[in-house]
Image: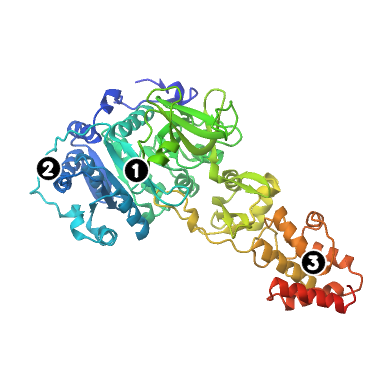
Amino acid sequence: MGQSKVPNSLGPAVKIAPKNPFIEFKKADTHQSIAARFEQVAGRYGARLAVKAGDEQLTYEALNRIGNRIARAIFARKGDHDPPIALLFKQGASMIKGSLAALKAGRIYAPIDYSVPLHRARTILQDSQADLIVTDRENFSFALEIIQAPEKILTIDDFNGDCSDRNLELSIAPDRPAFIHYTSGSTGEPKGVVGSHRNELVSIMLKTNALHVVPDDRISLLRSNNVGATSDTLLALLNGAAVFPVELKEEGLAQLARWLIEQEITIFTCVASVYRHCVRGLRGEERFPKLRLIHLGGEPVFESDLELYKRYFDDDCFLVSRLGISETKTATYYFMNKSTRVNDGVVPVGYPLDGYEIQILDENGERIGVDMIGEIAVKSEYLADGYWRQPELTRAKFLPDPQGGNARIYHTGDLGYLTADGCLVHVGRKDGQVKNRGYRVEISEIEKALLDIPDVLHAAVIRWENGPERKLLAAYVVPREGSGLSSGEISSRLRERLPSYMLPASIAMIDRLSLTASGKLDRRSLPIPQRMPITAEYRAPSTAVELMLATLWSEVLFLADVGVGDDFSELGGDSIAGARIVARVNEAFSLRCPLKILHDAPTVAKTAQFVIEQESDPGQSEEIATLFLQVQNMTREELGRALVDERSRRGDG
C-alpha cells in the first residue's frame, strides 16, 4: 500500500504510512459494550499474542477464557443490586485479567493503585461504594487492610479449570458506565471520573484510525492502574495487537530503552517525563528498528524533546503529541517527523479529532481570538459522563452546548491558544501559572529553560509555600553523570534566558526525580528547599551589621545561611518581603531608608555599607547590631524596647 495522508485535522504537513493490513475501526463498532468488541477480536485473533508481562504470555484465546472464569465469579457476587467493584493490582497481566473480567461481568470498576496510601485507598473504596475488591495473592494483605472483610475480596489466582470459560453473553448497554477513574483534583481529594462503554470505544476508534493500529503492533503499558492504563490496554486489545505492561516503580527507568528494543515495541506510549528520562540517558548507539510511534501526553512537550527524537530515532518513526485528560479522553493529535519545526520552542498538542471542538475562553467564559491565551475548553458528545456521585460538580464543569444538541463543553483548567489554522498550543495548567514578585510566571517555561541547558538530564520547578507571606520558586535538576554541572552555572545560564522574576530562588542538584504511579513527576516528593545557591559562592557575614542583616533576611525570606553576596531579588525577594526588611532596618537603626535601597544595594554587604554610612557616631551601627543579635530570641516587642533603651542611653532620643 502507498503513502496515505493523515487527515487534515492531524496536521496536513505530515504523512504516515498505514501498516498492512490496517483495518479501519468503524463507527458502527462503537454501538456495543467493550466486552463485546473484545470477544469479537479474540474470536478473530485467538492464536495471536495479547499480553506479555515479564515471563507471562497470554494469547487472545487464553486471555478471553481466563477473563470469562473471573467474570463468572464476579457475576455470582452480584446479589440484588449492581454496585461497582474495586480492582487492586500492580502493573502486569493480573491487572488486565481483572479489568477485562469486570467489563465482561457488566460491573463498573474503580481501579485502586497498589502504591497509594491506605487512607486514599479507603477513600476511593468508600466514595465508589464498591462492595468487592478483586485482587491477587500479592496484594491480598493490602486489600484486607482496605476493606477489612475477607469475604469481600476475590482473589483471581484461586481459579482453576473447573470454572466455565465460555463467554457470558450478557446484554450490556453501550451507554452504561464502564469504569470510575479517580484523579487527584486541585483540592487533593480524589474524585471519580465516569466513562461509558460507548465513549471509550469512540476514543479507541479515533486513536486506532489516527495511529493506524494493527494486530502486528506491540504497545507499551507503563502507566499503573488508572485511566491511562485502561486506554493503553484497550488500544491494543480491541485491535488484535499485543500489550506489554512493565512496572516502572520496580523496574525503574534505567533499562527502559533496552526493554523497548528487546520487546520490539512498535508504539511507545507514555507521559512526556518518562520519555524524557528514557531518551536523555541514551548514548547514541542504540537502535529502535521496530519503533514506529512515540505517543506522548499528560505533560508539556518541549522543542528539546523534539530534538531528542530527531537525534535518536529512525526516519520512519513519528513523534505524536496530544491533549487528553480523564474528562475528555484524547481530543487532539499533532504528528511530527524529522522535518518538523516548531515556533517559540513550544510543541503544539495538535488539531481536534472528529467529533471534538476546541474553544479558548477568557476569564468570563467568552471565546477569544487566534493566538490569544485563555482556558482550553473541549466540546464533544464523547466527554466523560461526569463525576461519580457529584452532580453539582458535574454540572459546573460539564456545560450544555448553548447551541443545543447532545454535545457538552468541559472547561479543562489548562491554558492554551489556537493558531490561525486551528492548531492548539498548550501552555500549561492554570494552577501552573503562579505569581512571583508581581508577575505571572508559567512554571513549564522555566522547566524548558532548564532542559535547554547542556548536561541537564531532567528538571522540575515547583512553587514552594512557607506560610501565607512566603512563596518562592524552587528548581530541582538531575545533571548528566560526570558533567560537573553546578547550581551556580545553571543560575548563570538562566539569567541569560529569563527575566529576574522568573529565576528560581533555589536550585537543588538531585540524583533523580521520583514519578507517580501514572508515570508523571511526583512533585510532592521533592525535598524542601534549603539554602538558595543562586550566587556562585557563599560568603559568611564578617561584621555584626552584616550578621544582623543576614539574620533579618533569613527570617523574612524563610531561608537559612544567607550570604553577604546574595542578591535580594535572586533569593526570591519581592516588594512585600522588601518592605518588611526595610521596616525592620529603619526601626533598628533609626533610619528612613526607602524601599528602593534593596534595588540600589541588593546584597547584605551593600546594605550593611549603606547603614554604616548613615551613622552619626563611629561604631554606632555595630553596637546596635550586636545588641540585636544578643536579644534576637526576644519577642519583637521586647526587642523594640531594648533598642529604644539603647538609643536613649546614647542620647539619640
Q: Which residue is mark 1?
A: 388
Instruction: Label 3: state its secondary structure.
Output: helix
Which residue sits at x=20%, y=54%? 155
Q: Work out whether mark 2 precedes mark 3 in sequence or the reverse, and give the earlier one.
A: 2
The total of numbered circles placed on residues is: 3
Colour scheme of the rendered structure: rainbow
Q: Position of residue 49 (x, y in %)?
A: 23, 40
Q: Position of residue 335 (x, y in %)?
A: 46, 30
Q: Which residue is mark 2?
A: 165
Quadrant (top left/top right/bottom left/bottom right) for the N terminus = top left
Task: Identify which amino acid the numbered label 3 is placed on.
Answer: Glu
Q: Which residue is mark 3?
A: 587
Q: Nearer the viewer, residue 77 or 346?
A: 77
Q: Position of residue 109 (x, y in %)?
A: 27, 45
Q: CA distance from mark 2 to mark 1?
A: 32 Å
Q: Work out whether mark 1 precedes mark 3 in sequence or the reverse, and give the earlier one.
A: 1
Single out the mark in the foreground, 2 or 1.
Answer: 1
Q: Work out whether mark 2 precedes mark 1 in sequence or the reverse, and give the earlier one.
A: 2
Q: Nearer the viewer, residue 376 or 302?
A: 376
Q: Say few, some or many: other residues with alpha carbon within 10 Å of mark 3 (under 14 / 14 to 19 / 20 or more).
A: some
Does any portion of residue 628 appear in the rendered image?
Answer: yes
Q: Position of residue 473 (x, y in %)?
A: 61, 53
The correct choice, above or below, for 403 with respect to 274 in the image is above
Task: Identify which amino acid the numbered label 2 is placed on.
Answer: Asp
The correct choice, above or below, for 652 with respect to 374 in the image is below
